[in-house]
Image (cartoon, helix red, strand yellow):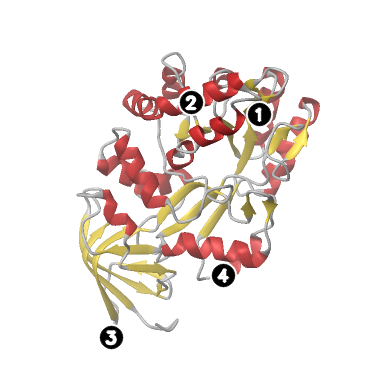
Amino acid sequence: MSDHEVLHVKGRVLVGPEDVRDELWCVDGRITFERPAGEALSVEGWALPGLVDAHCHVGLDRHGPVDGATAEKQALTDRDAGTLLIRDAGSPSDTRWIDAREDLPKIIRAGRHIARTRRYIRNYAHEIEPADLVEYVGREARRGDGWVKLVGDWIDREVGDLAPSWPRPEVEAAIAEAHRLGARVTAHCFAEDSLRDLVEAGIDCVEHATGLTEETIPLFAERGVAIVPTLVNIATFPHLADGGREKFPRWSAHMRRLHARRYDTVRAAWDAGVPVFVGTDAGGSLAHGLVAEEVEELTKAGIPALDALSATTWRARDWLGRPALEEGAPADLVVYGEDPRADVRVLAAPRRVVVNGRILA
């Protein structure tokens, strides 16, 4: 398909969970519901807005930053799986060049991770002490696309278990600085102990959130703090626990407990009204292109299929401030052979992937 052809998408266009249209057109890379003049290339099926992976790392692998060719391959893998909007939840790589590519997903960056010294994965983060937290949060707020990523907890080798990274006063000041600069703040958190301080300090989102309890879930719901559970990543906890069992038995046992109750934790949060969104944590040790698996994991946790679908489409885009299938919006959409509302496993087999009005997969 050339850049100048008009694309006609017909069948069932899922503008919203219950708002189903018969057709739309892609003209000059934009969506319209008004029939244009002339001929059009037709695609038929069930159309959704491009899927959202709200926790993904383009430009990062298990060892740290990657070269441009590898980052491109990561982005293409996500695109071909139907992920057309990514919130990059921390990367040391400069991926701004992707913005100029009309064939790649759109990325909302959180800058580089901000972690405590020697308490995160090597080569990933700015590793600093609490006195410098406000400065580095301000730096990444200016550098990112409206998000900043903290490492809220990690293993403390002296304690032998997960422990909070930041004192309450410093994290309060840092989140206030990010908000002053117009950025939202999210934090990696596996364990229980950092959550209350982060939420009461004004954080906007928590990644993983495996440490939620009946005491902290109501606080998240009251403050409207979202979670991105990354269940496809949490599935790796038993393997991680095996690797650290001899050296850090407390940590190993803790990770196993968090894994064992992962579905109950997510369902309890959802039942309480905590906003839940889809994220895979691709780009560290996990492969890209796992968005369909993560949606299915949310349904295994007990989230209704339509709500799990919305967590990677309409509701996710609204949360991130990006349009879905709206008049004049960028023509980023995915077409399936069956209704994904009836069975979310349909997401694993896109019939067509359309980016900026062009069929690319």
Mark 4 or 1, nearer chain start: 4
What is the spatial separation of the Cα atoms under label 4 and label 1, in whole angstroms?
A: 34 Å
Label 3 to label 2: alpha-carbon separation: 58 Å
Q: Are marks 4 and 1 in contact (CB under 8 Å)?
A: no
Q: Which label's residue is closer to the chain start, 3 or 4?
A: 3
Q: Foreground residue, 344 or 122?
A: 122
Instruction: Report how far apart the C-alphas of labels 4 and 2 lie in the structure.
Output: 42 Å
Q: Residue at x 52, y 71 (%)?
A: 102
At which x and y percent is residue 73?
Answer: 56, 65
Residue type, label 4: Arg
Label 3, on which residue? 39
Image: 167 above or below 4: above
**Nearer-N-terminus badge (1/3):** 3
Q: Amino acid at mark 1?
A: Ala
Q: Residue at x 27, y 49 (%)?
A: 344
Q: CA distance from mark 1 to mark 2?
A: 34 Å
Q: Report which residue position mark 2 lands on.
A: 256
Q: Nearer the viewer, mark 1 or mark 2?
A: 2
Element under label 4? loop
Q: Earlier in the sequence, mark 1 or mark 2?
A: 1
Q: What numbered label is drawn on residue 176?
A: 1
